[in-house]
Amino acid sequence: MSVDVPTVAVVFGAVTPPQGDVVGLQVHLGCTKEVSSFEVVLQNWNGKYSPNGPYPIVVGLDGSLSVGRGANCPLLLTCRVENVKYQSSPTESYLTVKGRCWGERLFRRVVSKTCENLKGEDIVKELLDYYIGLSHIRNGVELVESTDTTYTRLQYSDTPVMDILQEIADTADNSGVIGYDFRIAPDGKFEFFPKNSKNTAISLSERLESSEYSKDISRVRNKVTVYGAADKSIPLDKDEWTESLTPTGGTWIATSGTISLDSANKIKGLNSIKTSAQNLNYAACQLILNSGNEVDADLYPTFNLWLCRDASFNGNVTITLYDINDGSAAYEISLGAEKWFQTALPVGNTKRDCWQVLTQFNWHMIKQLRVTCWFDGVGTGSFWVDGVFFGGRQYSSMQEDMLSQNSIGLRELVEVNEELCSDLECESHAKALLSNLKDPAERLTLKSTVIDYGTTPILAGDTVHVNLPNEGVNGDFRVQSIEYNVDAKMQTLEITLELGREKPMLADYLYALRSRTSHLSRYKSAKH
């Protein structure tokens, strides 16, 4: 296949070397995970590009690189010179110029700020406008595309801008699919767009001189466990046990005094449990859990309750837990009068030293709980209990794919995400991760010296269609990176494409769905 010889145009500051001085040129275009870079080797006869020469090329200059064929020489890179190397001998003199695209600005600044209730695109624009100074508008068109994700809170301390952009790109979703790409376009503009949304019309059929296709299982995870917030409780409704004297799962009784349901003095819900004593040494109430509803305190490591007492009590309160064998564990607290106080006590085998245990106690089978308020001698008064629950367990879900496990072996992933506030949300997220990670990733490396892209070069982040009958490949691949390599001596332009194909990460909408005007937005908080 006949193609035109390569054409290059190189500019560094006010210096425009002629194409005859270009010995070699390599442009590497990347996106999201890396920025683009370049290397140019120039003839440097008589030191004309040296610092004391008539056309000095020095570090810090902005420039541009254009590469094409024949009359077509489109812009590939708006760049900055970061490294120069001069080499000379009695017969030869060369200058090697290296640098990166204007994306190098993403590595100059760190950010300390808090973003609250901002859409993903608004965070990106703020970084570009106030920290980086990269334009994101071309001919009046906004290049940072909208997301469907609102971040409730992102807090950063001396965090590189590049890291923040990558976090937004990795977590924001659009129309049900998670994942964005960003790149510095050839004209130096910043583009932010959903993955696989930039399609190139360039056909690679019959223009490939070599190809390497592989499947990689290193990313495969076929058993996924997701842990959420440590807020799971028994009961799930943290006020259920104190809304009735006979709640689901148990029964309240008075062990000293009388017990009643009180709708007047409460801190949560509709009711509280009131215990009254008249001319007694103490007042006490007790919740007896039904058989099968015993609590494992190693799974639920905190015992929580609200208490309020009359001033007639002396302020000493005893919390007593009983297991299925009537073994007991007691905890003493002091409580102020005439107002509600919340108490969270550590429970479980790791916290047993905090409790007074007179006999052997089974922390895995807590059957009863009792609250006792004491008088100094004999007294009369009432106390109230509300919002009783065992909590502190992480929400969780485990999902696995047996077909993948049988094929390539067990490969596990554990993720902790404190945004997830129910087992259902953990399950939804685990299923989304499993669907994305259970299959091998596909990789393609393609090389060609005959691809002619006219005035529209292939860029990293583009999607190209590849048909390789011998390898059984026929589908769309994402350009992870691409290199344009000009060899002046051989008069060739070799293009190397690194392509990848992975299943998209489907948004699982595990985050709170909240009505915003006429649409639903996904809300997320930072993972760090």
Image (spheres, grey):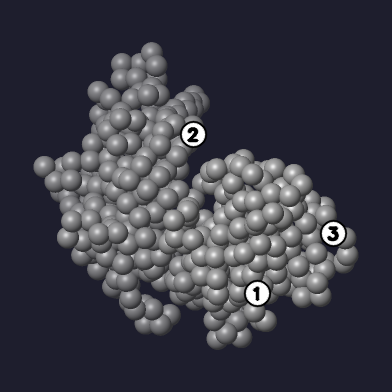
Q: Position of residue 18 (x, y in %)?
A: 26, 33
In this rendering, which labeled residue sits more in front, label 2 or label 3? 3
Q: Residue furthest front?
A: 279
Mark earlier in primary sequence (2, 3): 2
Mark linked to residue 202? none
Q: Quick one: quadrant of the N terminus? A: bottom left
Q: Residue furthest top?
A: 52
Q: Amino acid at mark 2?
A: Ser
What residue is at 61 percent from the left and 42 percent from the top?
Answer: 311
Q: CA distance from mark 2 to mark 1?
A: 48 Å
Residue identified by numbered label 1 = 289
Amino acid of disc 1: Leu
Give the CA distance from mark 3 to mark 1.
20 Å
Contact between labelled residues 1 and 2, with CB atoms less than 8 Å apart: no
Residue 45 can be seen, yes or no: no
Q: In the rendering, at what x and y percent does residue 526 appear?
A: 45, 48
Q: Secondary structure at mark 1?
A: strand
Circles 2 and 3: CB atoms closer than 8 Å? no
Q: Give the mark, 3 or 1, whose residue is nearer the N terminus.
A: 1
Name the amino acid, label 3. Val
Q: Which residue is mark 3?
A: 357
Residue 347 x/y as whole percent: 72, 58
Viewed as shown, does residue 417 lie left or right of 93? right
Give the mark toward the camera: 2 or 1.
Answer: 1
Pick the front one: 400 or 390: 390
Specify the label residue 157 is tagged with. Answer: 2
Q: Position of residue 178 (x, y in %)?
A: 36, 62
User: Height in image: 379 above or below 215?
Assistant: above
Camera-side residue: 270 or 411?
A: 270
